[in-house]
Amino acid sequence: MLEVATFAPHAPLHPGAALRERGGHGGLPEDSGLQPTAGEFAAVAGGPTASHGPQKRLITVTYRKRVEDALSVDDMIAHLEARLRAAGVAQNTYFIFSSDNGYHMGEYRLMPGKQTAFDTDIHVPLIVTGPGVPAGNVISQLASNVDLNPTFETLAGLSVPAHVDGHSLAGLWHGQQPSNWRRSVLIEHHGPDHARGDPDRQAKASADPPSYEAVRYSERALRALRRRGNRSITTLPATRWNSITSLRRASRPR
């Protein structure tokens, strides 16, 4: 097993000339969230800070550079696949592409960050190729990063201990449809963290929420933007970004 953790597309962003040309100099998607439609959520997540002027231009430039920088990851995967083909083992190798967190860039009028419970920050890619994995298949069941460990053990032919968190995804990848698959996953955040040396430190404009626990259900809805004590009391209608319910403030670990 080989794990490759790339620096791209983290800042500082310095895509080369070839990557800039391939990136097409595009701007933000039309549904980026910088439009006035996000106003009802902004007051909860930190205030309307990224809807006009210099902030919007900064987000647009940063987004373009991130897209250009991410092309280097595409190139790396292509080089790895070519080496495996040359070695004659490509057909017996799984490629699994994922991430540890999402990222918002203007959604809810927030400056870039990743600490909220919105789907922009908790929804990550999980793209798989390998023996017996149907091409173009899209799986709708909820998965979490804790599922990767038991999945790798299953693919290696090992038994998964009962105490291990998560569930093997190997069956789903190979077309099985378990009847009792989970319908929710736990989301946790501990903060705010204002330590100067912390690379994940965020300013209020990016949303720097206190500690919380949330449950992400397969149904798309968002509950919890105002709090009374430790309980959330507001339920908002679902949108394309929202998929969190039962959010509550959690005690900060000591």
Image (spheres, rainbow, N blue to C red):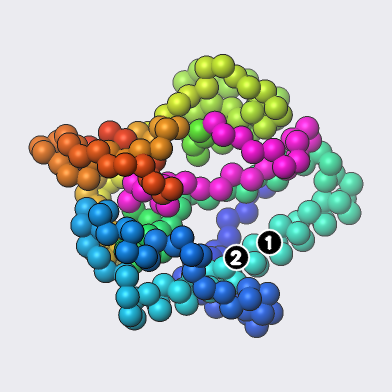
Position of 166 with respect to 53 (left or right) is right
Q: Does the magenta stretch include residue 218?
A: no
> In the rendered image, which quarter is residue 60 located in?
bottom left
Magenta stretch prevailing secondary structure: loop
Q: In which quarter of the image is the C terminus?
A: top left
- Residue at point 42%, 29% (across, down): 184
Position of 124 with respect to 175 (left or right) is left
Q: In this view, does 4 lie above or below 53?
A: above
What's the amino acid at mark 2? Ala
Which residue matches tag 2? 70
Which residue matches tag 1? 74
* Magenta stretch in the rendered image: 116-141
Report crowding for label 1: few under 14, some 14 to 19, many 20 or more residues within 10 A (C-alpha): few
Q: Is residue 161 above or below residue 205?
A: above
Element on which disc 2 rests = helix
What's the amino acid at mark 1? Asp
Along the viewing direction, whichever of 11 and 240 lies nearer the viewer: 240
Along the viewing direction, whichever of 239 and 176 lies nearer the viewer: 239
